[in-house]
């Protein structure tokens, strides 16, 4: 029996696939490679020391999902595959609802038809919208303010309804914050296709000379330096959180919901300062208007995950910047 990692060639999925292998589990990756590269597979095999089965599959294609479940025997699913750029979701909401919801429904349908019971879902802190206060706990009101976040919230509701309808169905909803850093080897990392949308890959590409300056969207937020505050979590810590959640699901079942974050919020300018120190490079910035859908401040209370999963983040902002720079410096073209 294997764990299916949907979107397993992507940034977070690939790091989690390595952690799954280290935990002694067999892994099958399914990815359409729309925002990832097939060239990551040999790197995963080198890091894991074994062949990594993978399938090029569009999970919005129900027949492709059925073929996947007929070919392999799964005991659990970790679902990463999704479109994830907030700005793009505001500009093209139909694309996001179509992709993120249909792919998930196809997976859940195949699970029910084949008797797979354990589902770990890659949710997001965007389900909280603009919180009334910080840090954010899991019982905060859910009110996503952009289409990307609403796709995550709708899927959470689907999982809650499925659990209510079937006591044997188990799900872990992991609401994580801003994921950064890379594998300590520098051999796999974040390699977005096209112009990156998130802060860290943008900074990294400025530092390596691929982008002239860093756009900073808004310097008039009610924060300590006017830029947005976010909770940045190292991808290695996040991958460990998925393993801990899967362990608990397989041992005790249930419907679990956890924030995965550090509990610390950093401004954009603080992140830039830390990255300049890690890389030894100057990061020129260009202040731009706020982006639709962005909020001023967002960071986690992750004490529930510590209490119930025995998990907590270990890596600092300096660690995140160091590992991000190591990957970018050694792989300026990503996997290409």
Image (cartoon, rainbow, N blue to C red):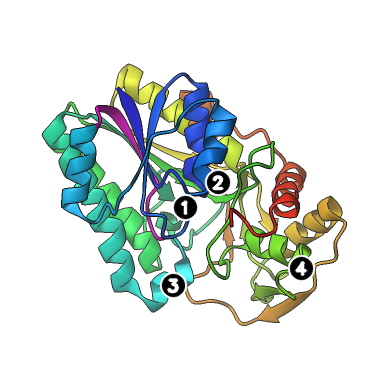
- Under tag 4, what secondary structure? loop
Earlier in the chain: of badge 1 and badge 4, it is: 1
Image check: 238 left or right of 143?
right
Comparing marks 3 and 1, which lies closer to the viewer?
3
Closer to viewer: mark 1 or mark 4: 4
Q: Which mark is residue 88?
A: 3
Alpha-carbon distance for marks 4 and 3? 25 Å
Q: Point out residue 34 in the picture as x, y percentages from the top left corner.
A: 41, 60
Q: Which residue is mark 2?
A: 300
Contact (Cβ within 8 Å) of mark 2 with mark 3: no
Q: Quadrant of residue 209?
A: bottom right
Check disc 4: other Cα within 10 Å, few if <14, some if 14-19, many if 20+. few
Tell me which numbered mark, 1 or 2, is placed earlier along the sequence: 1
The magenta span reads 72-83
User: Residues at badges 1 and 2 in contact (C-beta under 8 Å)?
Assistant: yes
Q: Secondary structure at mark 2?
A: loop
Q: Alpha carbon of mark 1 to alpha carbon of mark 4: how far?
A: 31 Å
- Work out whether mark 2 precedes mark 3 in sequence or the reverse, and give the earlier one: 3
Q: Residue at x 21, y 31 (%)?
A: 169
The mark nearer the N terminus, 4 or 3, is 3
Residue ID for mark 4: 209
- Earlier in the chain: of badge 3 and badge 1, it is 3
């Amino acid at each position: 029996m294997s764990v299916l990692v949907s979107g397993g060639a992507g940034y977070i999925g690939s790091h989690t696939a390595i952690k799954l292998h280290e935990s002694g589990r067999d892994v099958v990756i399914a990815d359409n490679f729309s925002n990832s590269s097939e060239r990551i597979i040999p790197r995963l095999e080198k890091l894991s020391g074994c062949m990594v089965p993978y399938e090029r599959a569009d999970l919005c294609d129900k027949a492709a999902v059925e073929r996947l479940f007929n070919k392999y025997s799964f005991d659990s699913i970790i679902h990463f595959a999704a479109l994830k750029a907030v700005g793009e979701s505001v500009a093209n909401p139909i694309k996001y609802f179509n992709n993120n919801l249909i792919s998930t429904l196809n997976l859940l349908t195949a699970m029910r038809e084949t008797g797979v019971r354990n589902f770990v879902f890659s949710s997001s802190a965007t389900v909280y919208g603009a919180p009334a206060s910080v840090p954010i706990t899991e019982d905060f009101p859910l009110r996503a303010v952009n289409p990307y976040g609403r796709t995550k919230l709708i899927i959470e509701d689907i999982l809650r309804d499925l659990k209510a309808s079937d006591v044997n169905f188990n799900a872990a909803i992991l609401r994580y914050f801003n994921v950064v850093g890379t594998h300590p080897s520098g051999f796999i990392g974040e390699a977005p296709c096209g112009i990156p949308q998130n802060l860290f890959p943008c900074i990294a590409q400025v530092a390596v000379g691929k982008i002239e300056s860093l756009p900073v969207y808004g310097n008039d937020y009610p924060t300590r330096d006017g830029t947005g505050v976010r909770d940045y979590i190292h991808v290695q810590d996040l991958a460990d959180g998925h393993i801990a959640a899967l362990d608990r699901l397989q041992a005790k079942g249930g419907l679990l919901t956890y924030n995965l974050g550090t509990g610390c919020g950093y401004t954009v300018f603080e992140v830039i300062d830390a990255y300049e120190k890690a890389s030894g490079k100057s990061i020129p910035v260009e202040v731009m208007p706020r982006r639709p859908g962005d909020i001023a401040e967002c960071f986690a209370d992750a004490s529930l995950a510590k209490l119930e999963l025995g998990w907590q983040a270990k890596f600092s902002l300096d660690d995140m910047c160091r590992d991000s720079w190591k990957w970018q410096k050694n792989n300026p073209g990503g996997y290409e």
